[in-house]
């Protein structure tokens, strides 16, 4: 039997696979089908009836989203069934549907946040009547509470149930539903409890009308006044594609953009709602501490102070890069401090035992984020993807839900929104894995995937763990031709990029924990707020960063730098995918891009760096024409190119695996970096999550 | 129909099934495979409503959800969808008054007035917690319209007077008799049967067929069924039994050796 089916759509003969829906077939033929309830990434509901088309011979118009092509039959003479997506019949049908949808929809477009980007508005113009014939009272629906992120005006709801399907299928927390029926049907969370998903903001994008809108963004701007800039998110190590919408010099909102390989079209709540943190607690000018108090200073004064602080001799200086550092800053800072002879440089969290082997694949997420859709077995070690890479977690769920992915976890038991086999809580449990049932699952799998959390490699036994996992991945053939099944899931957007430029201790240099130990005279923090700053003692601290957070409050000299929405900068995500942000707004006050600060400082210190513009710096990173470096290509993940490096035998590490339980790297999902900690919205979410004790906030 | 919401205050914090209900729960759950237990949600909600004085409280709904391992919202959707699940307290005797067209034409409006007068507005529970009423859609007893359902029983062929009398008895704790409230058996004509009264119609004497036409010659004795006495045989549409030798059937195929020749079953020796 043939797998394809012939159709005649609008007079055009077309052959499509049998599993296509009629809507897909029509789109293949170039027709535009209006819809409200249908969404590519959700199950088919077929309840809005907007996608009606005419099938010649059928007694009624057909809802094309729910009609599988393979279920259609040819005409009696054997010719392809005739489908029309336009014409008086279809137009009248859609017109009627539109009229019913609008019967109970309020006419409050002028005060509706969806106005201007509303599916209902657009389609009413395209397919609806010019005036209303309805003279009765419209129904009104009580607004529902759904937490601090989603604002509801339920009278506008057209019951498409996209949000209900998203929350149940993609987010994996069944908390929304449609209650009652008929005219009384209402969308609500259970007894109006707050949504506990870390992906809840996506229902705002999904809502085709203004029933679910963004609470923090409410009444702030109109879509047509916003300047839209495509960029990259830095709240986690995934590097999701985002669109930064700005008005004047303020970021008004952040929306996801489509990137099939990274975030599909979803975005985590932290990435989406962190924007109010970009306007608070900002460092907008240099500061110098005098008599225990920070006082505003000029760049010149600050640089002189820094120069004095750096004159203590290279062995007495240490540099720590933080979670959000961009590649350009890391490169410029590293070049400067190496030229000063400083060996104590590190970009990793305290206690890290990775990244120094010289093999890039050892710290990359080699199977790629999209690889989970091919994988048939997944072993998570010391990681909780739900908080460390929320959007990817939804993808694991998708793979589990629609495929036959089997998941094992060694680490903290948590609600990951899909079932998994809990194989242990500590690294020592890896010793027994060979005797577990899941080992056989891994062995039998065609595409097994083994993922280690970055935090698991930041312990005493990190090297041994790394060795054990590498050996395991070779034993279960996770690294084969065309499939590199070993990956490290990072939690910080800047980490891989900084590692790629070599921001690790030089031969004989000190690592993070020792730099912050209080023995050095001068410590430079490049936005490092996540590290333990309590042991710094009398060290002179220079803080370069965008927000007044832990680092700035301890600092003796503060140099203000731009945040991720304020510069065009390179980030490398956990897969090793090189991506660039775009400047959406100007840096605040006198803040400068990180690399420019170090370029200027290098001149003050008498060791000028060999680049004057960011382009020159990036050209240096890319290498010569034709040379193949990490930064020579943009936008792709190396993935299976790492097979060769990963299949090399690994050196034996000393010591044994610790039986101390893995702890999640992220204590509070909503407050992982200085930008998020400056955000009121995130604070509200965090307070709510810890009060509800939801799985999103681990503690 | 008004908006339906849980009466959270009256529902309290906890609910548990009565011990004697457990058997019924096991019966309903037993109907569905282990991975499809949520199919039992409607029967379990119904049992919960019975155990909770005729209405479904929020803790009761949660109890059902926990037992079936369903998210609360999914059970909530079911409970709010079906109007027979009542989300607020009702009286010990809850009157469901059918107001759909046939009953309306036969005087349901008058019954509503009686209820409003005797009890109060819909879903109001009298102070002694004995009575409440609501209007519902068709209860499927149109032939006995107008009618009401009180707890599990139908009270049919009502007049405002007879309903008032029933309510009066309920108020005072006097027993009432379910069924038609006039001289009538079930849906039979008032005052007894008017047609088909001849007893000969039913004793088989008119139906003098001894055998069905064109039957093959019976091999053995004429059987009880073949005499055309329906009361002597089992109903034919309830239970189908394999014809076996010795068992009296209408068409006796066992005695015919030819029966196997029609290709329905192959002779055994061919297999060897």
Image (cartoon, rainbow, N blue to C red):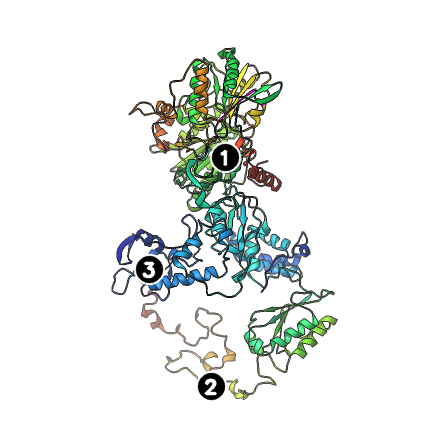
In which quadrant is the N terminus of chain A drawn?
bottom left
Find the distance from the CA under tag 2 to the CA under tag 3.
65 Å
Q: Quadrant of residue A677?
A: top right
What residue is drawn where x is 32% and y is 66%?
Answer: A57
Where is the C terminus of chain A found, in terms of image quarters?
top right
In this rendered view, identify the residue nearer to me: A415 or A276: A276
Q: How many residues crowd mark 3 within 10 Å: few (<14), some (14–19), many (20+)? A: some
- Front position among marks 1 and 3: 3
Answer with mark 1 or mark 3, whichever residue precedes in sequence.
3
Alpha carbon distance from label 1 to label 3:
47 Å
- Please state the chain letter of the residue tagged with numbered disc 1 in the rendered image: A
- Above or below — where is A430 with respect to A96? above
Q: Quick check: can you spot residue A2?
A: no
Q: Which mark is residue B207?
A: 2
**Residue at the spot of label 1:** A388
Question: In the rendering, at what x and y percent does residue A307 appear?
Answer: 50, 14
User: Do circles 1 and 2 both sit on a common chain?
Assistant: no
Host chain of mark 2:
B
Q: Of A501 and A131, which appears nearest the observer?
A: A131
Q: Which portion, as a residue range, is magenta?
A: A554-563
Based on the picture, tell me whether residue A560 belongs to the magenta stretch: yes
């Amino acid at each position: 039997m043939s797998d394809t089916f012939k159709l005649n759509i609008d007079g055009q003969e077309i052959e499509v696979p049998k599993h296509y829906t009629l809507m897909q077939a029509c789109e293949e033929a170039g027709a535009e089908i209006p819809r409200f309830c249908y969404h590519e990434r959700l199950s088919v509901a077929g309840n809005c009836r907007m996608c009606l088309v005419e099938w010649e011979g059928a007694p009624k118009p057909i809802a094309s989203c729910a009609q599988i092509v393979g279920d259609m039959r040819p005409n009696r003479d054997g010719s392809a069934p005739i489908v029309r997506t336009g014409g008086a019949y279809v137009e009248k049908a859609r017109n009627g549907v539109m009229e019913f949808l609008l019967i109970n929809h309020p006419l409050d477009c002028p005060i509706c946040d969806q106005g201007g980007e509303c599916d209902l508005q657009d389609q009413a113009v395209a397919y609806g009547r010019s005036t209303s014939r309805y003279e009765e009272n419209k129904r009104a629906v009580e607004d529902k509470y759904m937490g601090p992120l989603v604002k509801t005006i339920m009278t506008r709801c057209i019951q498409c149930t996209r949000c209900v399907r998203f929350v149940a299928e993609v987010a994996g927390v069944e908390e929304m539903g449609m209650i009652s029926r008929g005219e009384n049907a209402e969308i609500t969370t259970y007894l109006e409890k707050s949504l506990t998903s870390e992906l809840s903001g996506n229902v705002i994008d999904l809502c085709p009308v203004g029933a679910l809108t963004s609470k923090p963004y409410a009444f702030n701007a109109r879509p047509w006044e916003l300047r839209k800039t495509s960029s990259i998110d830095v709240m986690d190590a995934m590097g999701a594609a985002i669109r930064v919408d700005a008005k004047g010099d303020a970021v008004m909102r952040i929306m996801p953009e489509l990137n099939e390989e990274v975030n599909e079209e979803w975005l985590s709540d932290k990435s989406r709602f962190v924007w109010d943190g970009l306007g608070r607690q900002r460092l907008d000018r240099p500061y110098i501490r005098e008599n225990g108090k920070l006082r505003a200073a000029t760049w010149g004064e600050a640089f002189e102070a820094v120069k004095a602080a750096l004159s203590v001799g290279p062995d007495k200086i240490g540099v720590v890069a933080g979670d959000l550092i961009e590649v350009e800053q890391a490169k410029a800072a590293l070049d400067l401090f190496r030229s000063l002879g400083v060996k104590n440089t590190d970009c990793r969290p305290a206690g890290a035992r990775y990244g120094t082997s010289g093999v890039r694949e050892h710290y990359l997420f080699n199977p790629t984020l999209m690889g989970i859709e091919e994988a048939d077995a997944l072993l998570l070690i010391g990681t909780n993807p739900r908080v460390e890479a929320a959007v990817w977690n939804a993808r694991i769920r998708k793979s589990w839900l629609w495929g036959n992915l089997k998941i094992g976890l060694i680490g903290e038991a948590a609600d990951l929104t899909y079932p998994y086999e809990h194989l242990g809580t500590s690294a020592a449990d890896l010793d027994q894995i060979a005797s577990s049932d899941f080992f056989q699952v891994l062995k039998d799998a065609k595409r097994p995937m083994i993922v280690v959390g970055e935090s698991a490699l930041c312990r005493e036994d990190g090297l041994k763990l790394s060795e054990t996992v590498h050996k395991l991945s070779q034993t279960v053939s996770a690294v084969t031709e065309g499939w590199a099944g070993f990956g490290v899931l990072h939690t910080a957007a800047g980490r891989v990029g900084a590692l790629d430029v070599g921001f690790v201790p030089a031969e004989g240099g000190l690592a993070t924990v020792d730099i912050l130990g209080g023995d050095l005279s001068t410590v430079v923090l490049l936005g490092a707020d996540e590290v333990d700053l309590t042991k710094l003692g009398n060290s002179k601290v220079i803080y370069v960063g965008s927000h007044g957070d832990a680092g700035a409050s301890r600092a003796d000299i503060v140099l203000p730098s731009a945040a991720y929405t304020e510069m065009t900068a390179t980030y490398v995500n956990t897969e090793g995918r090189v991506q660039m942000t775009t400047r959406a707004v100007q840096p605040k006050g006198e803040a400068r891009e990180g690399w420019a600060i170090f370029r200027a400082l290098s001149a003050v210190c008498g060791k000028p760096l060999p680049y004057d513009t960011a382009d020159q710096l990036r050209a240096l990173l890319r290498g010569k024409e034709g040379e193949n470096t990490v930064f020579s290509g943009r936008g792709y993940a190396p993935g299976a190119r790492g097979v060769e490096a990963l299949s090399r035998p690994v050196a034996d590490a000393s010591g044994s695996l610790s039986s101390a339980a893995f702890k999640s790297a992220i204590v509070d999902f909503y407050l992982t970096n200085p930008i998020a900690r400056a955000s009121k919205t995130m604070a509200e979410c965090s307070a709510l999550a810890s009060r509800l004790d939801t799985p999103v906030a681990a503690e | 129909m008004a908006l339906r919401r849980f009466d959270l205050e009256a529902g309290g914090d906890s609910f548990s099934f009565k011990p004697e209900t457990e058997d019924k729960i096991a019966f309903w759950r037993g109907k569905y495979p282990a991975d499809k237990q949520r199919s039992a949600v409607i029967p379990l909600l119904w049992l919960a409503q019975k155990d909770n004085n005729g209405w479904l409280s929020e803790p009761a709904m949660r109890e059902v959800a926990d037992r079936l391992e369903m998210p609360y919202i999914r059970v909530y959707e079911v409970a709010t969808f079906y109007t027979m699940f009542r989300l607020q307290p009702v009286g010990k005797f809850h009157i469901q008054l059918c107001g759909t067209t046939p009953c309306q034409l036969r005087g349901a409006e008058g019954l509503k007035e009686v209820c409003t007068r005797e009890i109060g507005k819909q879903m109001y529970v009298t102070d002694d917690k004995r009575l409440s009423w609501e209007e519902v859609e068709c209860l499927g007893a149109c032939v006995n319209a107008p009618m009401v359902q009180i707890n599990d029983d139908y009270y049919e062929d009502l007049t405002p007077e007879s309903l008032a009398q029933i309510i009066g008895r309920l108020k005072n704790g006097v027993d009432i008799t379910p069924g038609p409230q006039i001289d009538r058996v079930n849906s039979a004509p008032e005052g007894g049967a008017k047609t088909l009264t001849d007893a000969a119609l039913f004793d088989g004497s008119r139906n003098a067929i001894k055998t069905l036409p064109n039957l093959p010659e019976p091999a053995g004795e004429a059987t009880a069924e073949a005499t055309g006495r329906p009361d002597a045989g089992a109903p034919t549409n309830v239970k189908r039994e394999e014809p076996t030798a010795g068992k009296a059937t209408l068409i006796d195929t066992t005695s015919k050796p030819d029966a196997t020749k029609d290709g329905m079953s192959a002779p055994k020796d061919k297999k060897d």
